[in-house]
């Protein structure tokens, strides 16, 4: 009797382990797909390709920047996505290079959050740093950026 119970437990444990594997693989695949859209945005920024950047976003995406003024007050600036995309496509002398690291992706069904510290350079010159919080939505075309909220500062970079 005990041998039968142990055998049943072993079989149940093996089945549970194997049936959970595809879910984890799918999650990693979805995390990679969400991350790829964020990478697409930064590739477009570096190359000045507004078309590539536009394809990363939902048409009504939002942009917000959270900053702290010299008097300590926190300010939130909201910008239209079109202005951002147009700025990317406007010729500029130096490369806009936003370098991200320690990227964390969290997914719940059709929504993902990508959290990543960054350092922004204009050409080889450091401009500012902060954290990006991307909200993505999975559409029939794949993951799209619904909004970005970032912080911006010149010191205390992570």
Image: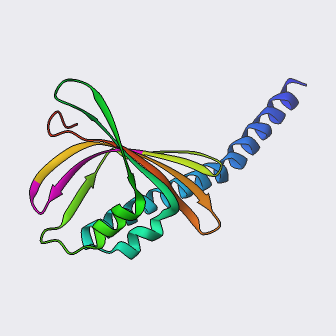
Quadrant placement of the C terminus: top left
Relative to 49, 14 lies left or right: right
**Residue at the right extreme of this rendering:** 1
Which residue is pictured at 61% across the width and 55% down the height?
A: 26
Q: Quick check: 26 above or below 129?
A: below
Which residue is pictured at 66% across the width and 54% down the height?
A: 22
Q: What stretch is highlighted in magenta?
A: 115-125
Which residue is pictured at 55% across the width and 61% down the height?
A: 143
- The x and y percentages for residue 156 are 17, 33
Front one among 35 and 13:
35
- Per the image, is 114 magenta? no
Which residue is pictured at 35% across the width and 62% down the height?
A: 83
Front one among 139 and 22:
139
Q: Quick check: 74 above or below 108?
A: above
**Residue at the left extreme of this rendering:** 125
Quadrant placement of the N terminus: top right
Label tally: 0
**Which quadrant holds residue 13?**
top right
Front one among 53 and 81:
81
Q: How is the image coloured?
A: rainbow
- The x and y percentages for residue 54 are 43, 69
Relative to 6, 127 lies left or right: left
- The x and y percentages for residue 62 are 46, 52
Q: Is the magenta stretch mostly helix, strand or loop?
A: strand
**Which quadrant holds residue 125?**
bottom left
């Amino acid at each position: 009797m005990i041998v039968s119970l142990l055998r049943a437990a072993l079989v149940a444990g093996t089945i549970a382990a194997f049936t959970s594997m595809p879910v984890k693989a799918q999650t990693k695949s979805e995390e990679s797909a969400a991350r790829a859209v964020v990478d697409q945005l930064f590739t477009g920024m570096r190359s000045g390709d507004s078309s590539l950047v536009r394809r990363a976003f939902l048409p009504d995406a939002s942009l917000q920047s959270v900053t702290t003024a010299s008097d300590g007050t926190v300010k939130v600036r909201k910008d239209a996505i079109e202005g951002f995309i147009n700025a990317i496509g406007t010729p500029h002398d130096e490369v806009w290079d936003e370098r991200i690291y320690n990227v964390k992706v969290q997914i719940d069904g059709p929504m993902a959050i990508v959290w990543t510290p960054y350092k922004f350079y204009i050409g080889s010159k450091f401009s500012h740093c902060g954290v990006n919080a991307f909200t993505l939505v999975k559409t029939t075309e794949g993951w799209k950026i619904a909004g970005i909220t970032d912080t911006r500062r010149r010191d205390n970079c992570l």
